[in-house]
Image (cartoon, grey):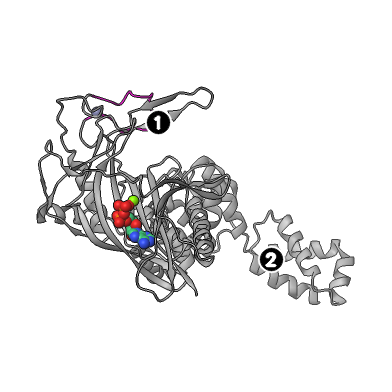
Amino acid sequence: MELEPVIGLEVHAQLLTSSKIFCACSTAFGASPNHHTCPICLGMPGVLPVLNRRVVEYALRMAIATNCVINRKNYFARKNYFYPDLPKGYQISQYASPLAEHGYVEIETEGGKKKIGITRIHMEEDAGKLIHDETNPMSYVDFNRTGVPLIEIVSEPDIRSAEEAVQYLRTLRDILVYLEICDGNMEEGSFRCDANISLRPRGQKEFGTRTELKNMNSFRHVQRALEYEIKRQMFIIESGGEVVQETRLWDESQGVTYAMRGKEEAHDYRYFPDPDLVAVFIDENWIAQVRSTLPELPGAKKQRFMEEYGLSTYDAGVLTSDRFLAEYFEKCAQKCQQPKSAANWIMGDLLKLVNEDKRTIKECPVTPEHLAEIINLISEGTISGKIGKEILEEAYSTGEAPRAIVEKKGLVQITDERFIAEVIERVIAHHPEQVAQYRAGKEKVFGFFVGQVMKETQGKANPKLVNDLLREKLKN
Ligand code: ADP
Ligand code: MG
Ligand code: ZN
C-alpha cells in the first residue's frame, strides 16, 4: 500500500502598515518593550477600536493577486482564549465572513505548473510576545506587537510533498513582497506558517487523520519538519497503528516533532461578531482601484522575461526572485544590444560585488544604465571582457561612469594590428623553447603565448586579433 501525503498550510503575514490595525500605535520593529502601546491595544475597559483602512487595502491586494472572490460585506469576530500575551482575552479576527475566499496560486513543481487552492484570506490582529528568562523562573510580556495587522492565508489540502509546500510558501512570499505589503522575513516572524499533514493510501478520496505542525522559522525548517512527520506517520500506519490528531512542535536541534496538545485540549474559541466594530463594505470601485495599482506579479514577469528577452527558465527565475532585481535587469537590458549578456553580468559579477558588500540590489552604486554602458563598450569592441570586469569594480567603488573610467585610465582596447603583431614577435623571440614545443605539436603552449601578449598589453589587446595573429606567426 503506497501512502500519499496531504498537506494544507496556514500562513500568517504581517502587513507593512505604519500603524496598528485598531489604534494609532506604531508597528515599527525593535522598540523598547511596551513602548508602542495605548489603552486600545492594551485592551483597557471601555475603549473602542477603529479599523485602519490601509489594512483592508493591503489585504485586498493579496486577495486580488491570489484570484480570490472578495466578500462585499466584512465582519470582525472575537476569538476568545486566555493567554498572557493577549490582554483583552480575545483576538479580533474574522470568522464567518472572511475578506476573501476560493482563490488559488500557481506553483512550479517537477511535473510542471500546479494550482494550489486558497480556502480563505482574513484580517486579524497579532498577539503580544512572551519572553522567557533563561536563568530565572520568570516570563516577561511585550505588547508592542499586540494589534499589529496580519492576514491569514489558509490553503486547501492540495499540497502533496514537502517540496511542494516550500514551493507554495516561496510563491506566496514572493507575491507579498512584490505587493509591498509584507517584508516576508521568516526569522523575525513577519511571515509564519503552520502545516497540517496527513497520509492516505494513494487513490483513496477521504483524507486521513492530520497533525498540525508549528514552530518552523525558515523554509528549511518547514521542509525538514514535514519530511520528518511524513516518515513518522508512515511508520505508525505501516505498523498497524493510528495517527492521533494533535498539534506538534518542530524541534530544529533534535530534528523531530513532539506533541504539544491533543484534540481534547483543542480550544473552543466561542467566536462571535465583535459588537465594537461596524461591518466593512467593499464596493466595486474600491476593488477596481486596488486592482489598478497592482504591479506585475512574479509569475507573469518570469514568463514575460523568457518571451521578451529570450532568457532561460533558470535565469528568468533568478532575476524575478526580487522585484528590484527584476527592475534593475529590465532597465539594463533595454539599453543593451544583447539582453542575455545583461542577465549574465547581473547574475555573475554584479551580484557577487553586491553580496560581498552585504548590500541589496536596491543599494547598488552602479546604475543599470552604467552596467549597460560597460556591456556595450565590450560588444562594440572598445574594451575587452576582462577590462570590463575591472571597470565594473571601479564603477562600483567610485560610482563613476564607465566611459569616463575608460578614458581616464586609457583602457581602450588595442585593435591596432601592427602594434599587436610587434608585441607577438617580441614574445616569440623571447621564448624559443616554447616555440619549438608548439611546433613539435604541443598545442597547449598556445595559451601561454596568449597570456604573455595580454600581459605585455595590460590585457588591452583585442583577444580575437591576438589569437588570429599568433596562430599565423607561430606557423611560420
Ligand atoms: P483548523 O481551524 O483546525 O486549523 P481547518 O479545517 O481550517 O482547521 O484547516 C486548516 C488547514 O488544514 C487547511 O490548510 C486545510 O487545507 C488543512 N487540512 C484540513 N484537513 C486536512 C487533512 N486531513 N490533511 C492535511 N491537511 C488538512
Ligand atoms: Mg489550524
Ligand atoms: Zn495602541
Q: Quadrant of ligand 3?
A: top left
What is the quadrant of residue 91 in the picture? Answer: top left
Q: Does residue 232 appear to the left or right of 36 in the view shown?
A: right
Query: Within 10 Å of the Cα at label 1, are there few (<14), some (14-19), or many (20+) other Cα atoms?
Result: few
What is the quadrant of residue 452 in the picture? Answer: bottom right
Disc 2 marks a residue whose amino acid type is Arg
Give the camera-side residue of 336 and 73. 73
Disc 1 marks a residue whose amino acid type is Leu
- Residue 130 image label: 1
Q: Does residue 55 appear to the left or right of 155 in the view shown?
A: left
Q: Does residue 220 appear to the left or right of 56 in the view shown?
A: right
Give the camera-side residue of 264 and 299. 264
Q: In the rendered image, is residue 414 in sight?
A: yes
Give the camera-side residue of 98 and 316. 98
Q: In the rendered image, is residue 154 in sight?
A: no
Q: Which residue is mark 2?
A: 418
